[in-house]
Image (spheres, helix red, strand yellow):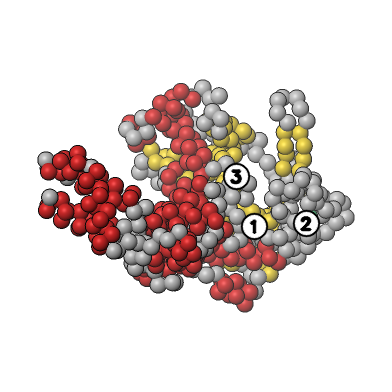
Amino acid sequence: MDVFHFEVIQLLIKKQVGMMENYELVIGLEVHVELSTESKLFCGCSTRFGAEPNTQVCPVCSGMPGTLPVLNKKAVESAVKAASALGCGVEEVSIFARKNYFYPDLPKNYQISQYERPIASDGFLMLDGRKIRIKRVHMEEDAGKLIHSAGESGPSYVDLNRSGIPLIEIVTEPDLKSSSEAETFLNNLKRILEYLEISDCNMEEGSLRCDANISVRPRGESRLGVKTEIKNMNSFKAVRKAIDYEAARQVSILSKNGRISQETRLWNESIQVTEGMRSKEEAHDYRYFPDPDLMPVYVTGQMCREITESIGELPLERKERFVREYGLSEYDASSLTSRKKVADYYEKVVSGKINPKAAANWIMGDLMALLKEHKTEIDSSPVLPGYMAELLSFTEDGRITGTTAKDVLSECFATGICPGDIVREKNLLQINDQDLITGTIREVLENNGKAVADYRNGREQAVGFLVGQIMRKTGGKANPAIVRDTLLKALKEM
Ligand code: ADP
Ligand code: MG
Ligand code: ZN
């Protein structure tokens, strides 16, 4: 572990005051995104996640001599989609190069990537009204995966199922200023890619990976400081923590007149520190050169236009429309549109002329809780959008009470039976019958002398208790407004 470790920890703790204040943080991200195409970038092998090791491999992606790569058109289209959504200029001609290095997960001893001529460059992503510039978007193939046995001396295994899966790498300019900004950037980027339906963006399965470049400089200084590159973070939270740690480490060095060495560092999740991996001197010289087995990639203006036009509404636009069209708050609109599936579900529900605010509350509240509890995604919810709309129309016109609606929702979730049938079969219609309610109230008042006495002594809470008793007696079906009115009248008359 670093000798600086304890000082760094102290700085992290005192971050709000003192030394950190004198420095500003500069961050640039490199994000790798696995494209969810059916087949790999240069061969027909499946890209499905979770298969038995080395069952999705062929001579091309296992690097056999004499094989030739054939480019996957779908992957190019996905890359163009991402580039357009990020406001990048898409190149008519881009070139695949060989990035040469030796590693056991790389059977060809080179990775096919784009280097001098990437497919797109110069875009941006909006972050709280500010443009974070995107330097480039390029295509490349993924490497295989090493599986190390536990302990020091066991063997390591190579799984080539991932070898050759298409990736895009998105590189930002050093425009991010804090760890939380970096985290928000990643969240927004993830939303966009999910909306484009070009990647699962699942960090646990490795379909989204991020390296962070970090430097610090004295406040007011215009030149950039020496950067380090942090790898090996496997969640957005880890990215945030690694950046905070690394910034504090750099500040603790600089404030003692030390120098930052340009290096690649690894985030060690178990002890929450960054550790040196290789210095600039040891940095690879990849000896890039154009891959002679592949033609340049041509994306005609026509093709680019067609792809761009196929992009639907993006998360930010959709959020703004939700505010405009449904009169939702920024907060509700943002939660509903942060995932495309949820927004789609919501729009199906409100298309049935349902109060948009009520629908938002029920979906983000009760439905989400049920989905979470049963580890179900909203697009496979047993409560279909039409069922949700039916349930909400029942509460809106007063046919059932809010309490009943909650029960019906759970029942519908558990059984998949539509709310209308549940209400009919279980006889759950709201009780609006004045005589019936008055009768129940009389009974409850007779049996709860203490609560009545409390009320007379000015204890308002007694009303709530009595309403609760009445609702219980009617199985939650009595109209709460009528119950309250009638109860108050009865109490006054006593
Ligand atoms: P390299 O040649 O070392 O790979 P690049 O210019 O390609 O560097 O940039 C890689 C990433 O590092 C980009 O995301 C860029 O924004 C970021 N970056 C470059 N310089 C700095 C710096 N001084 N501080 C923080 N990030 C930086
Ligand atoms: Mg780089
Ligand atoms: Zn293959």
The disc, 1 or 3, on the residue closer to the chain's N-terminal end is 1
Q: Secondary structure at mark 3?
A: loop
61 over 310 or under it: above or below: above
User: In the rendered structure, are the residues bearing label 3 and label 2 in contact, judged by CB atoms less than 8 Å apart?
Assistant: no
Which of 479/338 is in front?
Answer: 479
- Mark 1, Cα crowd under 10 Å, few <14 / some 14-19 / many 20+, is many
Q: Residue furthest right?
A: 66
Q: Position of residue 248 (x, y in %)?
A: 44, 33
Q: Residue at x 70, y 28 (%)?
A: 150
Most distant residue in the bottom direction: 302
Q: Nearer the viewer, residue 64 or 213?
A: 64
Q: Is mark 2 within 8 Å of ligand 3?
A: yes
Residue position marked by numbered label 3 in the rendering: 204
The kind of residue on which mark 2 rests is Cys
Q: Which residue is mark 2?
A: 45
Residue underneath mark 1: 35
Q: CA distance from mark 1 to mark 3?
A: 15 Å
